[in-house]
Image (cartoon, rainbow, N blue to C red):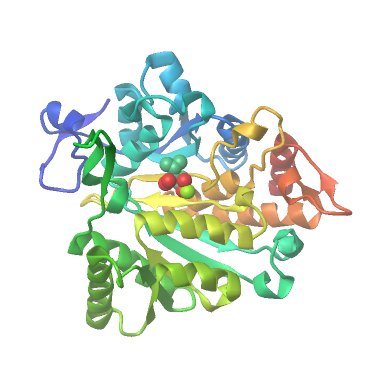
Amino acid sequence: YEIRNCDWSSDVCSSDLTKSLGYLMIKVKKRKILLLPGDGIGPEVIAEVKKIINWFNDKKSLDFEIDQELVGGCSYDKHGTPITDEVFYKALESEVIMLGAVGGPTWDNLEFSKKPERALLKLRKELKLFANLRPAICFKQLVDASTLKPEIVSGLDIMIVRELTGGIYFGEPRGIKPIENGERKGINTHTYTTSEITRVARIAFDLARKRSNKVTSCEKSNVMEAGQLWKEEVQELHEKEYKDVELSHMLADNCAMQLLRNPKQFDVIVTDNLFGDMLSDQASMLTGSLGLLPSASLGAKNKDGEMRAMYEPIHGSAPDIAGKGIANPIASILSFAMALRYSLDLDKEADILEKAVQDVLNDGLRTKDIMSEGMKETSTSAMGDAIISKLQ
Ligand code: IPM
Ligand code: MG
């Protein structure tokens, strides 16, 4: 790998692993895309993304360099760890990581540090991908696929900005320990610092300015100190730098309710790691299916303008439908559209890819999860092929 000396206090990876290499840093290689299909339906949906990347390489002469590696349960099966050092370093040098999904019942009983999910969390944390963008858009063609009434969801366009490297997912102390009376105690810690809150809030405000200029910040300031700090810091940042953006604060439980009652009241929602996990799954059902929602996990730009980023569908590995060729690849394909837009500076290409998805839906093609009467049920790979023929 290409390595260079770096200022350790700058925005670089701070894992023990990296430190043990003696303050070296892997430089991001432009246009390098690392595919990490993972487990369950991950390989099926990422195979469709690969076809799309190859199409852009062939037809648009884009010089994407693709590499592919194991991560999650499949990596554990082969190497005894959910992510090897080699794969981790490949991730560090890639401009874009396209992840499928990790996990499944086969690996449920593994010791915590070996669980497939640890690979994903390590990538997020060590690559400092603190801002997770999860857009929930209800395509007009799919208004009927939602379990909610059409008038509630049609025209819906929300952006959930989830904090991704802090909060209870990573707080210390954590663990399970025996206590005096023979019982055990499970411990997790929820913490946030000023800078962790403001850097993600800044992303939300900046995004809002390009959308409908409204941010709703969600926490549980009524019961958690970390929630109270969240609210205060967002408010202060707003007063200092973003007065032009409309800001409201909402308790996270109320937000869950409002998302079902009147989701179109929201533009950008900014919230912590755990609430963002839950609220984004909930928001996905407003759009018809979990199989439609892409996501982008972004780090900060360093002084050379490099940014690490990972793109993944918000759905999981769906072991119940894995291997059947029925998974919906749209969330992954739209995740690649986000990569074109946010990492690769290819807005026009992102537009045509998003339009190709729309066109295929207009033609009535549907994977099983979004199938409805009168539509044409199609497989995972046929959906990918149809999107490519629209690109054509
Ligand atoms: C998500 C997923 C992950 C999370 C899991 C797979 C660790 O649910 O990306 O929303 O909890 O963050
Ligand atoms: Mg989730």
Q: Is residue 316 left or right of residue 215?
A: right
**Residue in the picture at 67% in, 34% down:** 321
Question: For the view shown, which residue lies furthest in the front direction?
Answer: 181
Q: Quick check: can you spot residue 98?
A: yes
Q: Is residue 81 left or right of residue 70?
A: left
Q: Is residue 48 above or below residue 281?
A: above
**Residue in the picture at 49% in, 44% down:** 312
**Residue in the picture at 59% in, 45% down:** 333
Q: Quick check: can you spot residue 30?
A: no
Q: Position of residue 384 (x, y in %)?
A: 69, 40
Residue placed most toward the observer, 242 or 124: 124
Q: Quadrant of residue 48?
A: top right
Q: Quadrant of the N terminus?
A: top left
Residue placed most toward the observer, 62 or 271: 271
Q: Quadrant of the C terminus?
A: top right
Q: Position of residue 360 (x, y in %)?
A: 75, 51
